[in-house]
Amino acid sequence: MESITYNDLEKKVLSYSLVEIRKLRRAYEYANNHHKNQFRASGEPYIIHPLNVAYILSFMHADMDTIIASLLHDVVEDTESTLDEIEKTFNKTVRDLVDGVTKMTKLDFNNKKELSALNIRKLIVSLATDPRIIIIKLVDRLHNMRTLEYKSLEKQLEKSLETLEIYVPLSYYIGANKIRDELENLSFKYLKPSIYGDIKKQREDLKRETKNTLEKEIEKLKLLFKKNGIKVEFELRYKDIYSIYKKLLTKVNFDMIHDMISIKVIVKSPKDCYMALMLLHEAYTPINDKFKDYIAKPKTNMYKSLHTTVFGPDNRLLQFQIRTREMEQVAIYGLTSYWFKYKNNAKFFMKKDLENNFQFFKEIKELDSTILDNIEFLSQVKKELFGSNIYVYTTTGEVIELPNGATVIDFAYKIHTDIGNSMVAAIVNNESVPLDYVLENQDKVRIITDQSAYVPKDDWLDKVVTTSAKNKIMDYIKEHEE
C-alpha cells in the first residue's frame, strides 16, 4: 500500500481549503507525539493509521475540524490524552467529534457483548448530534479493513462480519456508496476467499473480452452527443465483486446480470439527462422493465440517476447510468458530498437533510428512545434497518422502506400515526388484502381509513414487525383503556 506522509495530507487539504495550516500541523504533531512508541500489527508507526484516515477524508473535502478530529480519533482511547486537553488545545467541536468516535472501554459491563453493543449504539445515534462522527468512523473502518491482512485469521473474520453487518448498512444509509462498495468487497474477500477469487477471475476475464470494444463504443457515443449539442463525460465500470455474488445467490447466471457492465453518462443538467436517455434509446434497443427513474423518485438515501439497460455491442447487456455532476457526487459520497457544496456549513445541511429526507433516521431515533437495553437495541437495528429491506409505494408514488416481513399495518404507521390508528382495510396492487398481509418488494399499497372505527386491536401487536408500529399501537390501546 502506498505510504502517505503529512506533506501529502497538507497538500491535499490546501487544494480545496484556504485554512490556517498551522492548526493542521499542530494536530498532526499532537497525535504523533501521543502515539509515539506505538506500532500497528504491520510494524508501522501507529500514526500511519490516523494520517491515512485524514487523507481519505481530504478527498471528500472534509472541513478542518473533521480532519483534525480524524488525526486525533484514537488518542483518548489509546494514550494518556484527555477530552479536556483536546478541547483546550483545539476547540469544543474537535473534542465532541473525538468523543463521538472514542469507544467506551473503562466502564463496568457484564460482558464484551454488552460493551460492543453499547459502542455500536453510541456510533449509530451520533447521527442525531453530528453526522461527521459516523463519517470519521466509516473511514477509520475502511483503512483498518485495507490493512486487515496483518491481523490473525480470527480477527479477520470477526472484523469482516461486523463490517458487513454494521458499517456497510450505515454507509449505504448515508449514501456513501464508494465507501460501502470497498467495505463490502474487502469483507467478502476475508469471509469467502475462494468464491471471491472465482468471481474476481470471471470479472477480469469479462473486462479483457469487452474493454476495447466498449471503449470504441464510447467514442461513437461522444460523437453522437456532440452532434446533438450535449456536453458529456463517460465512464466505463464493471459491477463490484460482492454485488455480483449477491446477484448469483438469486440464481441469476453470470452472463445475464443486467448491470454487470455499465457506463456512467455525466451531463450538465437534469434536462440533459432525459435528452441523453432519448439518444441512447434511439441508438440501442432498451429492455423496458430495466428502466428506473431515480431522478423523479430518488432512492431513500437520496441517490438520483436514470438507469436503463440495453442490448449493447456483441448483443451483451449494457447498463447506462445517466446523471449530472452533482448527482454523481451524491452517488459516490452521499452526505459527505455536502462538503463539496457547503464547505464549513456542511454539518448544518447534513443534519437538516437527515431529519427531513432520510427515512431511516426517524427509525433510529425512535428505537433509541424506546429501547433501553443495548443488546436489544442493536438486535432491532439489525432486524429493522440493517437486514433485507423491501421498497413499496404509496398511491402517490412515494417510496417507503420497510424491513422484510413487514405488514400493511407497519406500512400504515410508517405513513402517519393517524392513518395506522384509523385503518380498517388495505388494498395492495388493486386487490383487497387482510391486515396481516406481508408486503413484498414494489407492492403498491392503499390504506382505507375510518375515523369512527375503534381500532387498533390488541392482536395487531402480533401482526407488526417494526418497533415504531408496536409503540404506536400500545400508546393507542393504553390511552383508550383509561
Image (cartoon, helix red, strand yellow):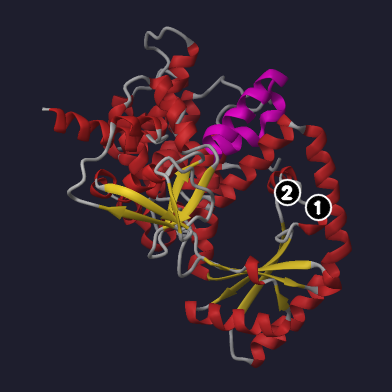
Rendering coords of residue 93 (x, y %): 30, 39
Rendering coords of residue 114 (x, y %): 44, 15
Q: Determine if residue 102 is in view.
A: no
The residue under the point 72% across, 61% down is: 258
Q: Give the magenta range.
A: 141-168
Q: Is residue 332 above or below residue 325?
A: above
Return the residue at label 1.
254
Quadrant containing the C terminus is top left
Q: Is residue 436 above or below residue 59?
A: above
* Three-letter residue code for mark 1: Phe
Secondary structure of the residue carrying tag 1 is helix
Residue 244's label in the rendered image is: 2
Q: Is residue 178 above or below residue 158?
A: below
Rendering coords of residue 238 (x, y %): 73, 58
Mark found first going from the N terminus, 1 or 2: 2
Q: Which class describes the residues within 10 Å of circle 1: few (<14), some (14-19), or many (20+)?
A: some
